[in-house]
Amino acid sequence: MNNAIDIRGITKKYGSLTALDNVTFSVPEGMMLGLIGPDGAGKTTLYRILTTLLSPDAGTATVAGLDTVKDYKGIRAEIGYMPERFSLYQDLTVNENLHFFASLFGVKVEDNYDLIAPIFHQLSKFPNRRAGALSGGMKQKLALGCALIHRPKVLLLDEPTTGVDAVSRSEFWDMLATLKEKGITILVSTSYMDEAQRCERIALIDKGRILDVNTPEKLVEGLGEHIYNVSAEKMYPLLEALRSLPEVKNCYTFGATLHIATESGFHPADAIRRLSDMGLTDVKIYPANGDIEDLFIKLAGNGE
């Protein structure tokens, strides 16, 4: 299988700050790969290199078989790009934005209607509404429609659902699944772990370094730790107390509870007794299924 995106040893620095540090991974044609990492991990810098807006200090990258430095003009016709911030013309209407971006690529909106039909159907209720007056979810769908207007081979999405409601996020990802079935390669960054699970493969990135690349299932299998949920009325004292237990390797906030990663000899009943001696008398500990977020915390914490 050919790679639609091939990144080899990409490094990018801003003065003394290393935004990307020898980043290497690839995305086969027709695959949807999720790029997962916190703010400041280097995701946006990588997207800017892949979209030819920046040149790397070292390493090479190809998109749709074209080098991002040598073939920058050709790449721009082969990709669709959605930056994190809504970047369409807010004073233009829905229809005006679609037709404007179609004209940039020398096509008509009708030429690739089959690709954007689900999006167009939702936007057709208010074709003359200005883009700036749309809801967050509709703004993202319009941006996706404009990114697809020329039928790109590769779709690059930088945290496309940030700040969007849960229903719109789900609808957006259903659209991505449909696009993948049509053969479009997708690289999408997200900070939502439920979205990451919908990707075929995931690349974990932190501080400009790739921590691991694999399927969601394989990544979780590699966690290799005993994970427990822990709760009590006084959560912060509980956090400090758990971190003092020698068999607890890591303890961190996980939603409304705490997650602990423990040694194999950890016994919840014994831990509850010792925590009670510390004044925490209402502690509950029960097994948890580790996920990608647990793995990310483990890898980032170990500096691996």
Image (spheres, helix red, strand yellow):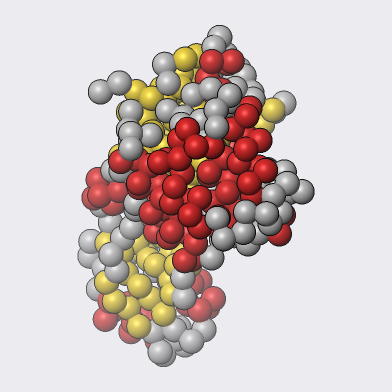
Q: Quadrant of residue 183?
A: top left
Q: Is residue 233 left or right of residue 82?
A: left
Locate the C terminus by quadrant: top left
How many numbered dots are placed on residues in this image? 0
Q: What residue is rendered at 63% in x and 27% in y?
A: 104
Q: Please, is residue 275 above or below residue 213 in the view?
A: below
**Closer to the camera, 24 or 247?**
24
Q: Is residue 3 above or below residue 248?
A: above
Residue 207, image x, y percentages: 55, 39
Q: Is residue 205 visible?
A: no
Q: For the point 64% across and 23% down, which residue is it? A: 54
Q: Vertical placement of 36 versus 152: above or below? A: below
Q: Inspect this view and state whether residue 264 appears.
A: yes
Q: Residue at x 38, y 34 (%)?
A: 184
Determine whether, in the image, residue 207 is placed left or right of residue 242: right
- Camera-side residue of 157 and 202: 157
Furthest residue toward top: 70
Viewer-side residue, 60 vs 302: 60
In the rendered image, residue 37, in percent from the top left (x then y), is placed at: 50, 46
